[in-house]
Amino acid sequence: MLELWERLVEVEQRLIPTGLHVFGRAARADECADLLRAVASFDRPERGARALTDLVSEGLDSGTYDSLLEDKTEEGWRRRARVEDIVRESIAVFMREGAGGACLALEREARVAASESSKVFALLSDVREKLATSAELDGLARALRGEYVEPGPGADVVQNPSVLPTGRNTHAVNPYAVPSRVAYERAGRVVDALLERHRAEHGRYPRAMALVLWGLDNIKTQGEGVAQALRLLGVRPVRDAMNRVTGVEPVSLEELGRPRVDVVMTVSGIFRDLFGATVMLLDAAVRCVAALDEPAELNPLRANVAAQVEQEGCSYEDASLRVFSNAPGSYGTNVNFMVMDSQWEHADALGDLFVTRKCFAYGRDREGRSLEGREAPGALSRALSRVEATYQNIDSFEIGLTDVDHYFEYLGGVSKAVETRARVRPSVYLSDAVSRDARVRSLEEMVRLETRAKTLNPKWYEGMLGHGFRGVAEIESHVTNTFGWSATAGAVDGWVYDEVAKTFVLDASMLERLSDLNPHSARSLVARLLEASGRGFWEAEDGVVEQLREAFNGLEDRIEGVAQAG
Ligand code: BEZ
Ligand code: MG
């Protein structure tokens, strides 16, 4: 019962985008409340503001909110629900009456001192005011005229409220400051949770993992993904007097308290371009760990390099390659295109394509010369053949696993490449950089959560349908991205397809709406469901495939009819 409740709360609390952003249009007031609640649930030391959840929890004598999150007793749940209700209500009061009323409400309901809550609501007032304005069109026009556009940081609003107002010239990060101290701290908690999760499921820590690192994520989080790789290897960044990261040093096995992990990093082309110094740092970290004189069971990286040199007669250099990306000047895995165009017969082709695109090694050789993207498919395949778990850090509240095709092309692509090379499907894990409790989820759990929170959620799809033609295309693209997780990782439950079919195709009035707004995307959606059934990703109930075929033919006729009439 408690577990069911926890699942419901999890879906309820996901921040769900209700529709697309319209360039140049400011957010409506009613769109702000959920966002403000998310902003208020984190400490903001730069504004001297503490998380509202903590203030309320402590005001009710329930300790910190983090301790409530850990408390799995019924009493713990009750207390947590009460804290969340009070926080939600205070945001509603803030929306209606402003900061003064909200502070009074919190003082009355949870004995929160106004001296504390006023700092939070001052921040929220600021965020709300800036959300109500949009300088995007003006900024674009100025950029096109070659005029000065004021700079601003890049992230999402929850991670960094000072991204507002939008419409500024987004600047990134100082790559020499990556990973930041905060990123390295947070990575410690996530990596602990990740390794514990694997141990709970498999009885021991993974000996080798494959990580996906993206450029924009590491900008937004100041290098949390990079820090996670360093933590898994068991090294820490070394900084100079200017706070620039200049190298790494090993954390002793004693301090680490667990074995090191052999880490294969597949980094995006954007990461490679933006974080040249960091690519070198990651490669140096691998070489540092491979050189440590430690027992094989505690340092599998060293053992794997030594075994490969001995058994396969390859050079030490090749055996220690672990940082891979595209060929210089090239981007992406193309796995997404292969899936979307249905251009594959056997799923192995998807993993092979990933390796073909991503097998370019970066780092330095023994003489310190840059490898500059040396093509090394054998080295990547060999490294992936030992991998037991794959992982990616999700950096944003706004974009998740089924919103874009890039998650499945990367994390799905590498997982499929591991599956064929290790001859066993790896465990696939994700975490969100933004959650408070460093929560790690399996891919299957995350797909379920995304499906319930978005694709099948009327609040989400009605928001999309409000955008007409483009909205239907978004719904279709979520279905295709979900399908991408079947193709690359077998991570989608059959009920997901059942429910998608029921919601969007078998419901005649919904199908009519989709067809009126955008028959092309409606047809693609139906075709994708048929493909899922044909490829055996889904065992459709009796008669459903026939109904889908009928719907498909109806859409074909309609599209052709329109073409002929035109
Ligand atoms: C990146 O930030 O590295 C990235 C962004 C979109 C797709 C793939 C990678
Ligand atoms: Mg794209």
Image: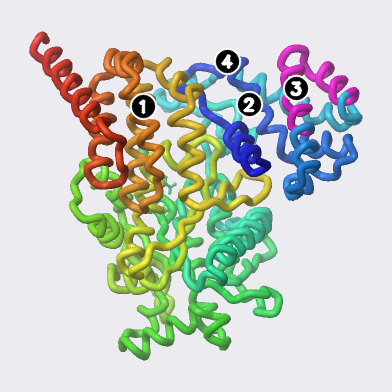
**Does 376 sit above or below residue 19?**
below
Closer mark to the observer between disc 1 and disc 3: 1
Closer mark to the observer between disc 4 and disc 1: 1
Q: In this figure, what is the number of numbered marks?
A: 4
Q: Kindly report the distance in space between the C-alpha atoms of the residues bearing marks 2 and 1.
A: 29 Å
Tag 4, which secondary structure?
Answer: loop
Label 1 crowd bin: few (<14), some (14–19), many (20+), radius 10 Å: some
Determine which residue is flagged by label 4: 28
Q: In the rendered structure, which disc, 4 or 1, sits on the residue that comes first in sequence?
A: 4
Q: Amino acid at mark 3?
A: Glu
Residue 542 location, quadrant: top left
Q: Quadrant of the C terminus?
A: top left
Determine which residue is flagged by label 3: 89
Q: Position of residue 546 (x, y in %)?
A: 21, 29
- Residue 463 visible to an observer of this rendering: yes
Question: Which residues lie in the magenta part?
Answer: 83-108
Label 4 crowd bin: few (<14), some (14–19), many (20+), radius 10 Å: few
Q: Kindly report the distance in space between the C-alpha atoms of the residues bearing marks 3 and 4.
A: 19 Å
Tag 2, which secondary structure?
Answer: helix
Q: In the rendered structure, which disc, 3 or 2, sits on the residue that comes first in sequence?
A: 2
Residue occupying image coordinates x 32% and y 62%? 417
**Does 321 sit above or below residue 188?**
below
Residue occupying image coordinates x 49% and y 62%? 277
Q: In the rendered structure, which disc, 3 or 4, sits on the residue that comes first in sequence?
A: 4
Mark 4 vs 1: CB contact within 8 A = no
Asked whether residue 88 is drawn in magenta, I would say yes
Determine which residue is flagged by label 2: 34
Q: Amino acid at mark 1?
A: Lys
Q: In the rendered structure, which disc, 1 or 3, sits on the residue that comes first in sequence?
A: 3
Determine which residue is flagged by label 1: 502
Q: Main secondary structure of the magenta part?
A: helix
Is 4 or 122 nearer to us in this picture? 4
